[in-house]
Image (cartoon, helix red, strand yellow):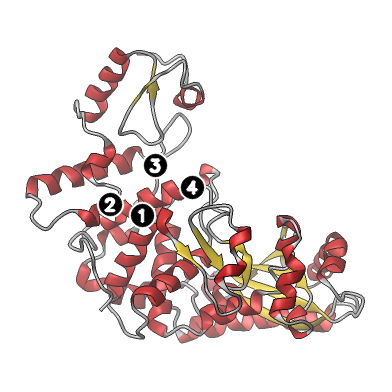
Amino acid sequence: MVRLHSFSYRRQNPSMFPEACDICAPERRFMLPAHKKQHDDAKHGNCSASFSDYSLLTPYYISSDVSSTRHSTQSNLLDTYRSTFFRNDTEISPPSSPLYSVLRSSLDKFVKDELEPDTEYNASCGAVVDRLCKFMQNNFPAELRPAQIIKGESLGKGTAVKGKSDADLVVFLSNPKFDSIPVVQNQMNKILNDMEFYLRYGKYTIEGQTPHAVKVSVSCHKEHTHDVDILPSVNILDKYSKRAIYQMMKGLNDKEQYFFSAALSPLQLEFVSQRPPKLKSLIRLVKFWRKTSFNESTGKRLPTSYPLEVITISQWLKECGRENFDLRKGFYNVLKALVNYCNLAYVCEDNYKSSDVKSSLKDSYHVMDPANPFNNLMGRCDCWEEVKSIAAICLAKPLLNDLQGYVGWI
């Protein structure tokens, strides 16, 4: 049968195509019941049950006395779902993460051998970033010269994954004319263009600009490259109290508030970098899962590293809080939280109070930036349903599928 209209077009015109498949994601729609039945027979073996009937999105709720037949059906459906996930006329299925084949007894070894940077790697990466910092300090003109450079992202926080680490360098400008965030905001285009001009003299590879940063690429250990964002800002934390800064931000729109993010990065860095080594190993595992489990070319805004770091830490603080725990159980609990993302409601009170965020919340589910009471870290991702589904797939794989219901971290 030749389709006259793509499934994307059909989803945009549900009145023309009222019959919808209960299993396919994204949804497939049909004009007549007979067309839907033909699809069900061909694609799903005349399976009349809905997707959620098999608990694929919440596999940890399955009771311990579920029959082996039920588990077999669930596994087969998950494999079918994975193979057709996000397929339409132009999209492809998500990749199969290497984690799907890791044995339960081998997870700690896998993280140690494959994800955790060794001393040589850390030294090499640190050296190349330090050289970039020294270049800016010694070669930028007085107008752009840094008073201080904050090393953020995974390299600065100690959560770098071997071979996949990146860095944010927040440059606090020393020029007294840049005395406030609004002044830097108004001059941002010129500052970024001037920074790019001088970075080219250092023979750094310029990858482009964002509204807040110059993006460069630097090479180090075994031909590995780092993506580095250089973000000019002002050290307002030394000038004002956190309470005063949040009051400044309160009446601003989202775009204006976002210009404060770089200035508040030391608070983000402190929140993550102080965590114990085992928790940082779990963060690496979660980041590796995100990196290897999703198709990056769909145009969707997937969660970046920082929201996943905060979600992981928040679950650990809520359910464990111990320096030593079972890594596999911790991973299970973080994925379970992502499957139940609609129930996430986390506010860190290290720098502000829960009452400070109420007026800024636009979504019922939220994980607030510990440095910024106006920044719901979940808001920048537009595909949490996809994250939920991929997390469910991982939960049903051999690494984790023996864990069901409530599972502690110890």
Instruction: Compute the Cα span from label 4 to label 1.
Output: 12 Å
19 over 130 or under it: above or below: above
- Based on the displayed image, in which of its 4 quarters is residue 176 positioned? bottom right
Tell me the number on the disc at residue 93.
Answer: 3
Q: Nearer the viewer, mark 3 or mark 1?
A: 1
* Residue 203 visible in this rendered orientation of the protein: no
Q: Nearer the viewer, residue 200 or 248?
A: 248
Image coordinates for residue 140, horizontal then vertical, percent: 85, 77
The type of residue carrying mark 2 is Thr
Q: Nearer the viewer, mark 2 or mark 3?
A: 2
Q: 22 left or right of 129?
A: left
The type of residue carrying mark 4 is Cys
Tell me the number on the disc at residue 58.
Answer: 2
Sort mark 1 into few (<14), some (14-19) or many (20+) by Cα contacts within 10 Å: many
User: Label 1 near label 2: C-beta < 8 Å?
Assistant: yes
Looking at the image, tell me whether mark 4 or mark 2 is earlier in sequence order: 2
Instruction: Compute the Cα span from label 3 to label 4.
Output: 15 Å
The type of residue carrying mark 1 is Val
Tell me what residue is drawn at x 84 percent, y 73 percent: 180
* Residue 128 visible in this rendered orientation of the protein: yes
Looking at the image, tell me whether mark 3 or mark 1 is earlier in sequence order: 3
Tell me the number on the disc at residue 383.
Answer: 4
> Which structural element holds mark 4?
loop
Q: Nearer the viewer, residue 342 or 207?
A: 342
Image coordinates for residue 158, horizontal then vertical, percent: 51, 80
- Based on the displayed image, in which of its 4 quarters is residue 250 positioned? bottom right
- The residue carrying mark 1 is 339
Instruction: Compute the Cα span from label 2 to label 3.
Output: 21 Å
Looking at the image, tell me whether mark 2 or mark 3 is earlier in sequence order: 2
Looking at the image, tell me whether mark 2 or mark 1 is earlier in sequence order: 2
Q: Nearer the viewer, mark 3 or mark 4?
A: 4
